[in-house]
Image (cartoon, helix red, strand yellow):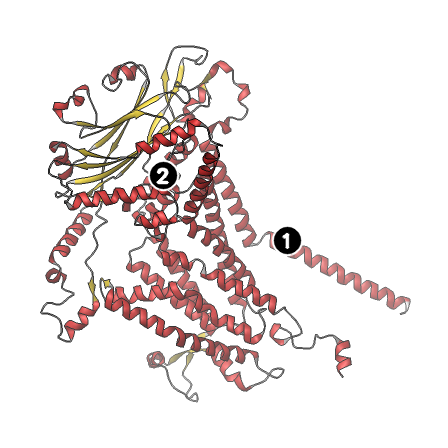
C-alpha cells in the first residue's frame, strides 16, 4: 500500500472504530434508561424496603441503632424469669369471664379440661359430648374420625398427610419433606445420646399430654351451643405458688403472678359449606329420550327437595349477611416471653404489657414487661371450621399450649405456628393478622384470605421471606415477558420458523381457563389477570395470522367461511393476510425452497397430528365425566372437562413449535429473551407448587413448561446458529470465500 492509502486505511479504520464506540455508548445509555431496567431497579428497591421494614417490625431495637448511648438504669426488662417453673390450667365455659362462683360445681358453668406443669409444649385432644350422646351417634363418629386424622398428622411425612384424609392437593410438600428429615435427625441424635436428659423428659411429657379425653359437658352449656350461642376456652398460666391463683384470680392478678387467655369456640361466617346440589347429566339424556321417570332431573325442587331447600336457605343467609355458626376444632395458645431489655422511652415498641414493680437491681425503673398469652388463629382457614346445628351431640377439640422461653421437642405439630413462638414472629404475625382483616374490608374473597393464612401458618420466617422475594421477582418477570413478547410480535415481519397454530391453541386454552375461573366464582385477583392474558394472546394471534378486514374482491374465488358470510353483508370479509401469503408462496423458491411456506406446512402437519392423538383422550375423559361425575349443569360440565384437558395436556400444545424447530434444524427465529423470562417464572411457580397448598392437577401443571423449555435448550445446543444459512436470517452469501473458491 502507498503511504496515502495507508493513512486513509488507518483513518477509515479509526472512523469505523470511533463509530462503533459511539454507537456502543449510545446503546448503553439507551439500555440504562429503558423500561426494563427501570422496572428492575424499582422492584429491587421496593423489595429491599419491604424486607427492611419487616425486619424492623420484628426487631424494633434495630431502629434505635447503638444502645450503648442509653444509661443502663433506664432499661426495662421482663418481670418473670426465663424458663420459670410454670403451671397451666384449661377450662371450658359458657361465660366470657370466669368469677369465683364459676368454679362452684353446682353452677355447672365451667368444666376443668386439664391441669399440669408447663414444661414446654402441651397438646391434648378432647371429645366433648352431651349427656344424650352415645358411641353410635353420627356426630360422635365424625368427631372421633376428625381427632384420628389430626393425630395421624403428628407422625410426620407425606404418607401421614395422605392417611389423615388430606391428599397431596392440600399438602405443603416442601415443608413436610423438611420436617420429616429434621425429625428423623433429632430421633437419631437422641438415639446416640447427643440430646440432654431434659429434652428427653420434655418429649415424654408431651407424649403423655397427647392422650385423648372424653369430657361430658353439662346440658345447659351444650344446649347453648346447639342454639347458636358459643362456648369459651379459658387458659391460665401461673407461677408456682402455695395457693391456687386461679380461684383467687384477683389477688394473683394484682401480684402479676398469673396470665389469662380466652378463646371463643364459635365463629359466625357466611355459610360456605353448602353447595348447590349436583346431578348426573346422563340422567338428563335418559329423561329426554323417555327412559327415566316423570320429573325432570334439572328440577331440583322435586328431585332433591331437602338439599335444594338447604341451599336456598344458605343463599338467603348470604344475601342478608347472616352468619352461620362454625365450631373451631383447634385452639393454639402461645406463651410469648421477651428476654431483651428495652430503653424506658421505647419500651412500647416491644408490644408487651408494662406493669409496675418494686425498684431493684433487675428493675431500676420500677417498671417491667409482663409475658403475653397469644391466641394464634392465623392458620384457621374456613375449611377447618365445622358447621353446628341442633342435632349436634359431640364435637372434637384439640388444644395446644406452647412457650417460647424453653426448647421443646414435642410432637405438637409440623407447621410453623406449632411449638413456641418467638417475640419477633409474634410481632410479625400480629401485623399480618391485621392486614388480613383489612383485606376483608377491601372486598377480597374468603378463598384469597385462606390462601394467605395457609402460606403464613405453614411457612417459617426464612421461607416466608423467600416466598415474598419470589413473588416480587415473579411480577417483574411477568412484566418483562409481556414487554418483550409485545415488542417481538409488533416488529415481526417474517413467519419463518414460527408456529401460528400454537398461538391459537394457547389462546383457546387461556379462554377456557378464564371461563372456568368465572364458573367457580374465583376472586378478581385471579380472574382479571387471566382476562388480561386472554387479550394479549388474542393480539398475538392477530399479529401472527395478520387478520384484516378487506373489501370484497369479486375476482377472488374459493370457499367462503361462515363468519365471512356475515361480514359480506356489509361489503367486507375477515382474512388472515399473512397466512394467505404463506400459502400462495408454497410453490415459489428462495435458495431452493421457500422457508415461510415450509414453516406453514410443517405447522399444519404437526397440529393435525397432535389433534388426532389428543382427540380420543379428551373425548374419553369428557364422556367419563358425563356418565360418572355430578355437575351443576351442562355448561359447568363442558367448562370443567375442557379446563381439565388444558391442565393435564397443556404442555403438549407446545409440540408444534418443537416439531417445527426439528424440521428447520434451527431455533434462531424464536424470541429467546421472552422464553428465558418465562423459564425463570416456571422455576418460581415450581417453588410455589412445593410451598402452597393447591389442587393436584394445578400442581402438576406447574412443571409442564419446564419440560418444554428443557427440550428448547437441547434443540438450541443441537442446532447452533449459522448466519450463512437462510433459515438463520442470511441469504447464503456470507459463507467463507476461501471455501467457496475451493468448491469451485
**Which comes before the other along the chain, label 1 or label 2?**
1
Give neighbour class at mark 1: few <14, some 14-19, many 20+ (Cα, 10 Å): few
Tag nearer the camera, 1 or 2: 2
Q: Is residue 419 left or right of residue 292?
A: right
- Quarter of image, res 9: bottom right
Q: Residue at x 40, y 56 (%)?
A: 699
Q: Is residue 95 visible?
A: yes
- Evaluate if marks 1 and 2 touch, with contact meaning CB atoms under 8 Å apart: no
**Which residue is tagged 1?**
29
How many marks overall? 2
Of 572 and 321, the residue lying toward us: 321
Quarter of the image with the C terminus in it: bottom right
**Above or below: residue 714 compared with residue 568:** above
**Which residue is tagged 2?**
413
Residue 113 placement (x, y as % from top left)? 23, 29
- Quarter of image, res 269: top left
Q: Secondary structure at mark 2?
A: loop
Residue 88 placement (x, y as % from top left)? 30, 25
**Above or below: residue 346 compared with residue 147:** above
Residue 385 placement (x, y as % from top left)? 25, 43
Q: Secondary structure at mark 1?
A: helix
Q: State the separation of the CA atoms marked 1 and 2.
A: 55 Å
Amino acid at each position: 500500500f502507498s503511504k496515502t492509502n495507508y493513512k486513509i486505511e488507518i483513518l477509515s479504520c479509526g472512523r469505523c472504530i470511533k463509530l462503533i464506540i459511539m454507537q456502543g455508548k449510545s446503546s448503553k445509555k439507551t439500555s440504562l434508561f429503558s423500561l426494563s431496567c427501570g422496572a428492575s431497579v424499582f422492584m429491587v428497591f421496593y423489595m429491599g424496603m419491604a424486607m427492611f421494614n419487616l425486619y424492623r417490625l420484628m426487631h424494633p431495637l434495630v431502629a434505635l441503632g447503638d444502645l450503648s448511648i442509653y444509661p443502663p438504669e433506664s432499661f426495662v426488662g421482663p418481670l418473670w424469669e426465663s424458663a420459670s417453673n410454670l403451671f397451666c390450667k384449661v377450662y371450658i365455659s359458657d361465660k366470657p369471664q370466669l368469677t369465683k362462683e364459676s368454679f362452684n360445681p353446682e353452677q355447672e358453668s365451667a368444666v376443668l379440661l386439664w391441669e399440669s406443669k408447663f414444661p414446654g409444649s402441651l397438646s391434648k385432644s378432647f371429645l366433648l359430648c352431651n349427656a344424650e350422646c352415645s358411641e353410635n351417634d353420627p356426630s360422635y363418629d365424625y368427631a372421633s374420625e376428625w381427632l384420628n386424622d389430626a393425630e395421624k398428622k403428628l407422625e410426620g411425612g407425606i404418607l401421614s398427610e395422605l392417611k389423615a384424609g388430606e391428599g397431596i392437593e392440600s399438602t405443603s410438600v416442601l415443608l413436610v419433606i423438611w420436617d420429616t428429615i429434621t425429625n428423623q435427625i433429632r430421633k437419631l441424635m437422641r438415639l446416640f445420646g447427643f440430646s440432654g436428659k431434659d429434652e428427653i423428659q420434655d418429649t415424654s411429657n408431651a407424649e403423655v399430654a397427647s392422650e385423648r379425653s372424653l369430657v361430658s359437658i353439662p346440658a345447659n352449656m351444650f344446649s347453648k351451643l346447639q342454639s347458636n350461642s358459643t362456648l369459651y376456652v379459658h387458659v391460665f398460666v401461673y407461677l408456682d405458688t402455695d395457693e391456687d391463683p386461679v380461684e383467687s384470680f384477683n389477688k394473683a392478678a394484682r401480684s402479676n403472678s398469673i396470665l389469662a387467655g380466652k378463646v371463643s369456640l364459635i365463629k359466625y361466617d357466611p355459610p360456605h359449606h353448602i353447595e348447590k346440589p349436583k346431578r348426573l347429566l346422563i340422567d338428563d339424556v335418559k329423561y329426554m329420550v323417555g327412559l327415566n321417570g316423570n320429573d325432570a332431573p334439572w328440577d331440583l325442587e322435586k328431585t332433591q327437595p331437602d338439599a335444594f331447600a338447604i341451599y336456598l336457605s344458605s343463599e338467603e343467609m348470604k344475601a342478608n349477611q347472616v352468619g352461620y355458626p362454625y365450631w373451631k376444632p383447634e385452639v393454639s395458645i402461645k406463651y410469648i416471653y421477651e428476654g431483651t431489655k428495652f430503653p424506658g422511652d421505647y419500651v412500647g415498641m416491644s408490644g408487651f404489657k408494662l406493669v409496675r414493680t418494686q425498684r431493684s437491681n433487675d428493675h431500676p425503673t420500677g417498671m417491667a414487661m409482663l409475658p403475653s398469652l397469644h391466641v394464634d388463629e392465623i392458620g384457621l382457614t374456613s375449611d377447618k371450621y365445622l358447621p353446628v346445628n341442633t342435632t349436634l351431640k359431640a364435637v372434637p377439640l384439640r388444644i395446644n399450649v406452647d412457650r417460647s422461653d424453653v426448647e421443646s421437642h414435642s410432637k405438637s405439630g409440623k407447621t410453623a405456628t406449632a411449638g413456641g413462638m418467638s417475640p419477633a414472629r409474634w410481632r410479625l404475625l400480629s401485623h399480618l393478622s391485621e392486614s388480613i382483616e383489612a383485606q376483608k374490608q377491601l372486598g377480597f374473597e374468603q378463598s384469597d384470605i385462606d390462601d394467605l393464612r395457609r402460606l403464613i401458618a405453614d411457612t417459617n420466617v426464612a421461607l416466608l421471606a423467600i416466598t415474598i422475594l419470589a413473588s416480587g421477582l415473579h411480577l417483574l418477570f411477568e412484566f418483562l415477558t409481556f414487554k418483550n413478547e409485545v415488542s417481538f410480535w409488533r416488529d415481526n415481519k417474517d413467519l419463518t420458523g414460527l408456529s401460528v397454530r400454537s398461538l391459537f391453541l394457547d389462546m383457546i386454552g387461556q379462554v377456557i381457563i378464564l371461563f372456568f375461573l368465572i364458573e367457580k366464582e374465583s376472586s378478581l385477583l385471579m380472574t382479571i389477570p387471566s382476562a388480561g392474558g386472554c387479550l394479549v394472546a388474542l393480539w398475538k394471534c392477530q399479529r401472527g395470522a395478520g387478520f384484516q378486514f378487506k373489501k370484497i374482491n369479486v375476482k377472488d374465488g374459493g370457499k367462503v367461511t361462515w363468519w365471512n358470510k356475515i361480514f359480506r353483508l356489509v361489503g367486507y370479509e375477515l382474512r388472515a393476510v399473512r397466512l394467505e401469503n404463506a400459502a400462495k408462496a408454497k410453490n415459489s423458491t428462495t435458495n431452493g425452497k421457500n422457508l415461510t411456506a415450509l414453516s406453514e406446512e410443517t405447522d399444519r402437519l404437526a397440529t393435525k397430528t397432535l389433534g388426532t392423538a389428543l382427540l380420543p383422550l379428551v373425548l374419553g375423559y369428557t364422556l367419563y365425566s358425563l356418565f360418572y361425575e355430578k355437575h351443576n349443569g351442562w355448561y359447568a360440565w363442558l367448562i370443567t372437562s375442557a379446563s381439565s384437558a388444558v391442565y393435564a395436556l397443556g404442555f403438549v400444545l407446545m409440540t408444534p413449535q418443537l416439531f417445527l424447530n426439528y424440521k428447520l434444524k434451527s431455533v434462531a427465529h424464536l424470541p429467546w429473551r421472552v422464553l428465558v423470562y418465562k423459564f425463570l417464572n416456571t422455576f418460581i411457580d415450581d417453588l410455589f407448587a412445593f410451598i402452597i397448598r393447591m389442587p393436584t392437577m394445578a400442581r402438576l401443571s406447574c412443571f409442564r413448561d419446564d419440560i418444554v423449555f428443557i427440550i428448547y435448550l437441547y434443540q438450541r445446543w443441537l442446532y447452533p446458529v449459522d448466519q450463512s444459512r437462510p433459515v438463520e436470517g442470511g441469504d447464503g452469501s456470507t459463507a467463507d470465500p476461501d471455501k467457496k473458491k475451493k468448491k469451485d
